[in-house]
Image: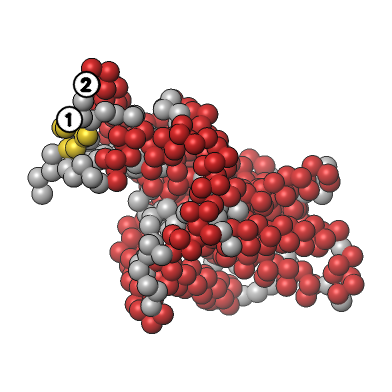
Amino acid sequence: MTKRYSLFLAIILLLFVSLITILCIHSRIATDDYWYIWFLKTYGIIESCKSQYMEWCGRFSTSFIGMSLYKLFGLNQIYYCFIPLGAFVLLVSGFYRSSGGIMSHFNFPIPRFQRFLASLSFVALMYFLSMEKGEPWFWYVALYDYLINIGMYLWAFSFLFQSRYKFLSYIGMIVCIIYSGGSSEVFSIIFGIFITLFIIYKYREADNLRSFISSPFNKKLLLLYAVFGICFIIVIVAPGNYLRAGLLPESRFFYSFFIICKSYVKYFIVFLPLQIPYIFIFSVVFILIGTKIKTDYPQLFIIPFKKFFINSTIFLLSVLFLFFFILAYLMVERGPARVWLLVSFLFSTYVTVVAFYSGYAGLFDGKKISIIKKASITAGLLFMIFNVVYQYSVTSTYSSAIDSRNTYLIETNKTIKKDTLIKLAPLPDCGMLYSSDIQPDTSHFTNQELRLGFNLKFHVYVEKKAP
């Protein structure tokens, strides 16, 4: 990887970080956030977490963290901006540390600056491969269960591979895997499969069971697996899961396969082709790293690229099939965008691994590499400059409109003494953020949650937008 390419890639990634920072600054409290703020004011953290576990879902770790932050911040919007920003930093650092641990474990080092660029590129790829980005990346109530969950999972594996500071690495690993295991049920199933497969791989690598168990690394891995499993069981047995399931349509086994087909079409045919420029921009760095590793370690990987590509693709499609089936069977639908964040994570991992191996396998000669570097840098600069400028314009207008609306609600609430009906102006386009707008129907849950959050003495609605 040349210094010139590294410099331009760093500029592109700096623009990406600027984009994320702009979106974090202009993100705002929305819908369910207001409900939790009200609930915490009314019942407190412990009672709220207990109610969540008994009456809604068993995600004990994310419930506790989320409830604590809602209780701490209240309606002080300025503090909430640090939640998505912190989740972003957690994700980048988690990939950086876990990739470093894996490389150390398998003895092929990558320079730190290149690994940092690769980590940012992976997160950028994951971001642009996310559907309806505002919900999984900037809606506070969704961040705890999904985006932060993935970050903690990566950090847990980074502590697993860490050999220094043994005691601290054990504590860090356990804390991170408790968070991840006590979070999203669907994510835990998929992550649990990955851990199981890794254990099988390590077992086959050992000569026998005694040799497998005697390995300090494998002991640590089994501890991670056990803690993760216990947390998952605690989540699954929660009474709230069954009460919530009663609100969903009855599951239909064979109809689930129709929904799975729709899910594949939605992501791979409708959504993914539009993201090809971003796949190209942020995957080239992994091709270059693979090419460099081939030069230094020519016998590290011996599987032919075609076989590796086919096996990786089959594995990805199989895992996605399981993921889509779980959603389709339990929810009788494709599931919300926030849950599909896992699809983005899995596909981004697939792209980076295949790109790395294509570079290692020597699919690109010097001339082709020179062309794709120039093309990716040019495209990256154009796309990222456009995104930064456009999203700043759109989201700053959106956040200003919300701030003005909230100020109006607070001031109006001081003067109105009896129940009445107040019409609000519809909010402008929220860009890549999650909209906090309400509906023309005063009984809609978004209207009711806004009313609870601000403890309004009146009802609110917006005029129906023209089609």
Question: Whole-percent x and y of residue 156?
Answer: 68, 51
- Side (left or right) of 420 relative to 366: left
What is the number of the mark on residue 29? none
Residue 156 can be seen, yes or no: yes
Give the quadrant of residue 396: top left
The front one of 140 and 15 is 140
Residue farthest toward the front in the current orientation of the protein: 418
- Side (left or right) of 101 relative to 325: right
Question: Whole-percent x and y of residue 207?
Answer: 86, 76
What is the number of the mark on residue 420? 1
Tag 1: amino acid: Thr
Mark 1: which secondary structure? Answer: loop
Name the residue carrying label 2: 416
Measured along the vertical axis of the image, is residue 314 above or below residue 431?
A: below
The front one of 391 and 170 is 170
Residue farthest toward the bottom in the current orientation of the protein: 254
Question: Whole-percent x and y of residue 265?
Answer: 33, 70
Q: How crowded is mark 2: few (under 14 residues within 10 Å), some or many (20 or more)?
A: few
Residue at the (38%, 57%) spot, across then down: 336
Question: Whole-percent x and y of residue 259?
Answer: 35, 73
In whole angstroms, how far apart are the C-alphas of marks 2 and 1? 8 Å
Q: How crowded is mark 1: few (under 14 residues within 10 Å), some or many (20 or more)?
A: few
Give the quadrant of residue 429: top left
- Side (left or right) of 320 relative to 402: right
Mark 2: which secondary structure? Answer: loop
User: Answer yes or no: do the residues labelled 2 and 1 have beta carbons within 8 Å?
Assistant: yes
Residue at the (50%, 49%) spot, across then down: 52
Residue at the (19%, 37%) spot, across then down: 461
